[in-house]
Image (cartoon, rainbow, N blue to C red):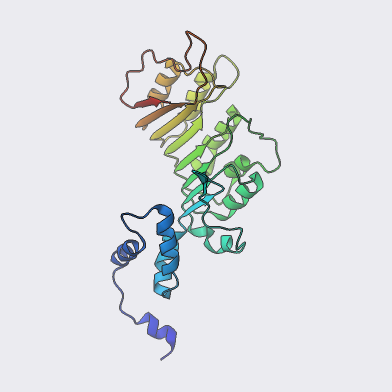
Amino acid sequence: MPENDSLQKQPRLPPELEYIIFMMATSDANDSGDEMRIHAARLTRVAKRVQEWIRPVLYSIFVQGLFLSLIDATFPKLYIDPDLLKRVAGLAKHLFIGHHVSDQSVIVLLRHCVNVRDIAIRRDYAEPFQGDKEDNYLDYLCASATLRGVRSLFLTIRLAQDDLESIQMAEAFKDLTHLDIIFPNWKGYNHGRNLVRILSGFTKLTHLATTVVPSSKTLEAPTISGILSSCAHLEIFIIKAILTPPPSGTSVLNSNGWGSTRILAGN
């Protein structure tokens, strides 16, 4: 009997049960994420059926150029095997990109990881985002014809008003539920109203986080109230702060009249 026919006639468990078994085999309650992935990588050598289930689990999370407590958290290590990206990028669901990845490399990752659902791009908020650069990954994100169904977006860059509007109108983000951005420092008297107007366009947004940095404008109560009233499905609004000591008698957070159980604030 041909080998392929023999494999097809082998008894199989229901897919849902088989998936649970392989998930249990790859993880341990005491394992960290890195240890789990190392263990799963070893299991891929066992058999073809193991590989079919382990590979999607193993490569569902891409961490590139991110250092945690001076430990390189990069996985998979694409620089060791350049062809690996083409083979496994379609399995990526969660993409975390750190400071040490060039803008051009960000675009390459986004181009290949077409099934990603959660995108986090970490940059130095103190450096203005240069939207006129040729390798503008934000333009690529907003114009992408392949990215669909992104659920969460985390950006530590100072977005111009046009940038946030482009994100809101992009096909890739029409189902966005989680957004985490630096509180903008737009010019003009109506910057708060413009922010509320754009955020209200994310019609499925349930979780919003904004970080107030030293260069940000004051986050006023009318802006907060406008966000809470205009974003119909918003459940959680997190306000974070990275502060230098403010001048005496001033505050970057004007909390008068918040009065909402949906707000979490801290620094």
Give the quadrant of residue 264.
top left
Measured along the vertical axis of the image, is residue 224 above or below residue 131? above
- Report if residue 125 is visible in the image: yes
State left or right for residue 172 relative to residue 7: right
Position of the N terminus by quadrant: bottom left
Q: Residue at x 47, y 31 (%)?
A: 201
- Residue 198 % position (x, y): 50, 28
Q: Nearer the viewer, residue 95 or 188?
A: 95
Q: Is residue 45 left or right of residue 233?
A: right
- Taking depth in this image into account, of 31 and 128 the one nearest to the observer is 31
Q: Farthest residue in the top direction?
A: 249
What is the number of callouts on the image?
Answer: 0
Q: Residue at x 33, y 27 (%)?
A: 262
Q: Quadrant of the C terminus?
A: top left
Name the outermost residue toward the bottom: 1
Residue at (57% x, 33% y) in the render: 157
Give x and y (percent) for residue 107: 62, 48
Where on the picture, by quarter, is residue 256?
Answer: top left
* Residue 232 shows in this picture: no
- Give the camera-side residue of 121 and 241: 241
Query: Picture coordinates of residue 97 (x, y %)?
Result: 54, 46
Q: Position of residue 162 (x, y in %)?
A: 60, 30
Residue 266 versus residue 226: which sits nearer the camera? 266
Write the residue at 43% across / 15% down: 254
Q: Residue furthest front?
A: 70
